Amino acid sequence: MRIGIAGPGRRRNGLGEFVVKFLAQCGAVPVAVAASDFGRSRFHAERLAALYNIQCRPYASVTEMLVGENLDALAICTPPEGHAEQLNLALDRGIHVFCEKPLIWKRNKDTTATANVLVKSFYEKNLVLHCNTQWTYTLADFERLHGPIEHAVVEKFEIQLSPAMKDTESMIREAVPHANSLLLALGATGKPWNLEFAEHEVNGAPKQWEARFSIRAKSGQTISARYRFTQCREQPRPAAYAINGREARREITLQGYRQYFCAGARRVAICDPLKTSVMEFLEKIRICRSGGGVLFNSAAAENMRLLGYLYLSQCYE
């Protein structure tokens, strides 16, 4: 499975380098990279070779990479403002896509309709479109820590994340898709109401942004949701979420980059959810190749709808 990577570096806190590593670990073959120019592409190709012994040809642009390589899939790890163009390029080439969240982004615009068209277009062409909101893969770990989640009685959801950038738009763009993915996986649907937003930045302390709202669950009950983000530039960044008051706090040991979920004195080791996300992407392609087809990516479409609503509500509050 030959894969090209758009955005193989760490500029603006990207995950491209780690996506490449996990693709190779999971049996795919990263063959080419395209950064913002040829010099940066060559730099990242040399870095991947030195760190992971992964040999990739550098290209000056995504377009050149798609013309120059016979790819099965494209991993889009670039800043989200360029995602729409790159997704359309992949559609034109008829290849599968692993795309970093958010699926697409345009400042002060609701991109829900555009996202829906893209999701539908990939589905109609029988192509996998996998949006990397990897926190959903930790729900099984949450259950190992706290026991089964009864979706029918989820009444309260809270999440705390630590984006690297502090301006409100960047915090929303980077962290809300993760929060949305968990909330939607717990059964939330429809339009939120009772929205309240708050921002705090005092005497040089880290910027904080918070959203509170109510949203209906598919089972009919109301879920009270709270998103709270605090800027943190340094790794490891604090993260936690709670379902009905039961919290799972992520801890990371940088030596070996081991991850855990903790609650009080209890702690369980978890697999890196980014690696799990990559594995699922590749499995979706294998199912498609074996004749199983692709499923309509309703989760990506719903995430973009909820993201757009929260973002624009904050903009015009």
Image: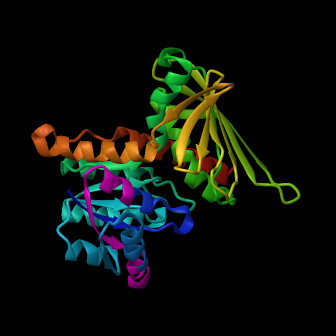
Q: Nearer the viewer, residue 261 or 205?
A: 261
Name the residue at the front extreme: 255
* Quadrant in which the N terminus appears: bottom left
Q: Which residues are drawn in magenta?
A: 20-42
In this rendering, the answer to whether 81 lies above or below 133 is: below
Check if residue 270 falls in the magenta segment: no
Q: Residue at x 39, y 52 (%)?
A: 115
Residue 47 as seen in the image, left or right of residue 5: right
Q: Residue at x 30, y 46 (%)?
A: 281
Q: Residue at x 53, y 58 (%)?
A: 109
Q: How many numbered discs, if any?
A: 0
Q: Nearer the viewer, residue 13 or 317?
A: 13
Visible residue check, residue 133: no
Where is residue 2, by image quadrant? bottom left
Residue 14 pos. (x, y %)? 50, 62
Name the residue at the left extreme: 291
Residue 84 pos. (x, y %)? 38, 62
Name the residue at the right extreme: 203
Residue 211 pos. (x, y %)? 68, 41
Check if residue 25 falls in the magenta segment: yes
Residue 271 pos. (x, y %)? 45, 39
Where is residue 263, by image quadrant? top right
In this rendering, the answer to whether 54 lies above or below 252 is: below
